[in-house]
Amino acid sequence: MDVFDELVRLRALGQKSALATIVEVNGSIPSFQTAKLLVREDGSMAGTIGGGCVEAEVWNAAREVIATGKPRNMQFSLGQDAAYDNGLICGGQLQVFVECITPQPSAIVFGGGHISKSLCKVLDLAGFRTSVVDNRETYANRERFPEAADIHAEEYEDVFPKLFVNDSTYVVIVTRGHRDDMRVLRWAVSTSARYIAMIGSRRKTIAVIKELEKEGIPNSEFERIYAPMGFEIGAVSPEEIAISVAAEMIAMRRDPDGKWRSLSKTVFADEKLRAVLL
């Protein structure tokens, strides 16, 4: 199996992996410089960097790299330890670089209005694979969204089963009204999406969440919703709002631990909303 073909396949499936590459060699080793080992999320492998204890140690490091997203630089001396008595004592040294390969982040934008038009342009520039969903064909079409990878002009409930969502997926809800927002949010909170954002005022957010709570959806499901969406930069126009939302998504992508969280608030991090909802 070709490592690069498999890497592309995994990214298309939205799955993480770790790629280990021999980047430097001194002396004799049972492999060669640039040899690669790909470790999948489930621990299975493609390719090899020579087998034996070195590969076993690199496999362990690769699992850690997948979990943390932080690369590792590893040094090995094949003659320094009796643990390599299984045939790997060649007297050489090698350096292995292990990096996390993440899938391209995908953004699903519900609603085809003015904000969505600007948002798709910005997200495409920022490296997101964007899909647009609207139940009106006049709003969900290729002429209106030339940058979108996928466009769905169908009822939302008909589209939900067709969407692949994982922790690299970002959901933005900007439909034409409260009821449609509620339809999408009901589905979104049941997914593993990394980011769920909804446009609207505090009053609208409260109204939508309260209605969904009446349906039996637990309060805890709404803790990861960003509403009002976007960084608080005083955005007014559709273009400015799109930039504020894209910035929030980029911050979530690059800094999941929340370095920029002070600029943005989830529903329950907003004290005014929290006081009403809890």
Image (spheres, grey):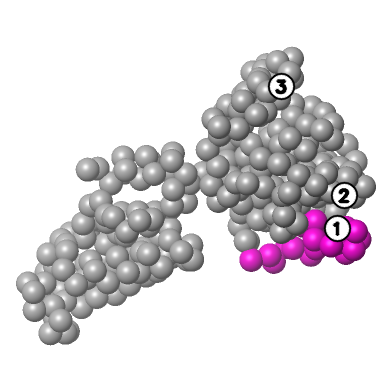
Can the viewer see residue 196 in this picture?
A: yes
Q: Give the CA separation, mark 1 to mark 2.
A: 7 Å
Query: Which amino acid type is shown beneath numbered disc 2?
Result: Ile
Q: Residue at x 32, y 43 (%)?
A: 6
| Quadrant where the N terminus is found in the figure | top left
Q: Give the CA separation, mark 3 to mark 2.
A: 25 Å
Query: Which amino acid type is shown beneath numbered disc 1?
Result: Leu
Residue linked to disc 3: 135
- Magenta stretch contains residue 110: no
Q: Check the image and report above or below for 163 versus 214.
A: above
Foreground disc of the pair 3, 1: 1
Part of the protein shown in magenta: 257-278
Query: Which amino acid type is shown beneath numbered disc 3?
Result: Asn
- Label pair 1/2, CB-CB below 8 angstroms: yes
- Relative placement, left or right, of 57 versus 125 is left
Residue 8 lies, in percent from the top left, at: 38, 41
Q: Residue at x 67, y 28 (%)?
A: 156
Helix, strand, or loop for circle 2? helix
Residue linked to disc 2: 206
Name the image quarter holding residue 256: bottom right
Q: Check the image and report above or below for 249 versus 264.
A: above
Residue 115 image label: none
